[in-house]
Amino acid sequence: MIDRQRRRWLRYSLVLLGLASSARAQTTRGRFPARDIQIVVPAEPGGGIDIMARLLAKGMAAVMAQPVVVINRSGGGGTLGAGSVARAEPDGHTLLVNGVGHLVAPMLYADASFDPVKDFTPLARFGVAPNVLVVHESLKDLTLAQLIRDARSRTAGFAYASAGYGNTSHLAAELFMSRTDTRWLHVPYRGTGPAVRALLAGEVQLMFLPAGSVATALATGRAHALAVAHRQRLPQLPGIHTLAEHGVHDADFSQWYGLFAPAGVAAAIADQLADAATQVFRDSALLHQLGSLGIEPAVLGRIDFTRLVASESQRLASIISKENIRNSVN
């Protein structure tokens, strides 16, 4: 009799343990985040996208009470890192921080393994970095109108630097040339740093430079800011007119920074991530830090950022097609 009772209680105990284990498993599966969140940056450390990703990761870790780590996965013009996120499990634990290059790279690299619109869920945009037209000191006495006239009269034109094919410095120049009926020689470099050094050395005569890098270039005395490719003047360059103020319209071109998840992520998780990201970039101390980097706070939530990605994809495709922009590597 005692043995039967012990066996019965043992069976009951095993059933209860099984139910408890199942409940814990269901709770773990339903909780988000359940582990560290990884933010992939498809570029080397130290650039604008990397800086923004690290600021975001630090803030999101505090908001979500979960570690958020940044992983740099460069190569293929940004396609390797972005492609790895597109193939990741859409559970919200693997994310991507990218900019305009996210939409451009598949248009220039034939081996890109993802669709920048269909394979991702846009979560939030949190900053914009305007471009500034900067010229070598040998051209500093020219106005923009004189520069345009001079470029048209030259057989070979000027040489301009970019941080690589598809970079905003490249596309901004192509759009400007289209709007002004000018033609410059494109000299691509591997990153903003080498491009700026080439400009300062006089190897090229001009380039469109992200606002955050302008102050350093101007401080050398070997470069001069000529115009801002943005809808308004920049606080750090109040005396430099916009392209529109110079009479060059529809030529604005800025870098933006946004957060993406793989396509298929649950709406509730996407909302939680988007809310955390936008909350981070509303902090007053962080906004001041962005200003010192030449980055304009420009927060967009899921819906508005999704619309921007769709419209930007069409605009960029039009520019690349019309200007017949090609990546010479392919």
Image (spheres, rainbow, N blue to C red):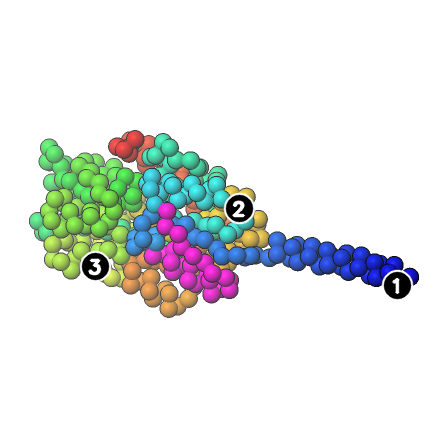
Residue 267 is left or right of residue 100, and the answer is: right
User: Residue 25, how many percent across, how many down?
Assistant: 65, 55
Ranked by sequence position, the earlier of labels 2 and 1 is: 1
Front of the two marks 2 and 1: 1
Q: What's the residue at 42%, 62% (across, down)?
A: 58
Pointer 1: what residue?
2
Magenta residues, start to end: 51-73
Q: Which residue is mark 3?
A: 215
Say what secondary structure mark 1 lies in: helix
If you read the primary sequence from the N terminus, does the residue marked by circle 3 or circle 2 appear first?
Answer: 2
Give the percent coordinates (x, y) of residue 48. 31, 53
Label 2 sits on residue: 90
| Cα gap from disc 2 to disc 1, whole angstroms | 53 Å
As for residue 232 lying within the magenta part, the answer is: no
Q: Residue at x 14, y 44 (%)?
A: 204
Prevailing SS of the magenta stretch: helix
Badge 1 amino acid:
Ile
For mark 2, does the 10 Å Cα neighbourhood hold few (<14), some (14 to 19), or many (20 or more) residues?
many
Residue at x-position 47% and y-position 65%: 62
Image quadrant holding the N terminus, namely: bottom right
The reply to whether discs 3 and 1 touch (Cβ–Cβ < 8 Å) is no
Amino acid at the residue labelled 2: Pro
Q: Is residue 157 left or right of residue 245?
A: left
Q: Is residue 123 above or below residue 312?
A: below
The percent coordinates of residue 142 (x first, y second) are 11, 49
At x 41%, y 59%, the residue is: 56
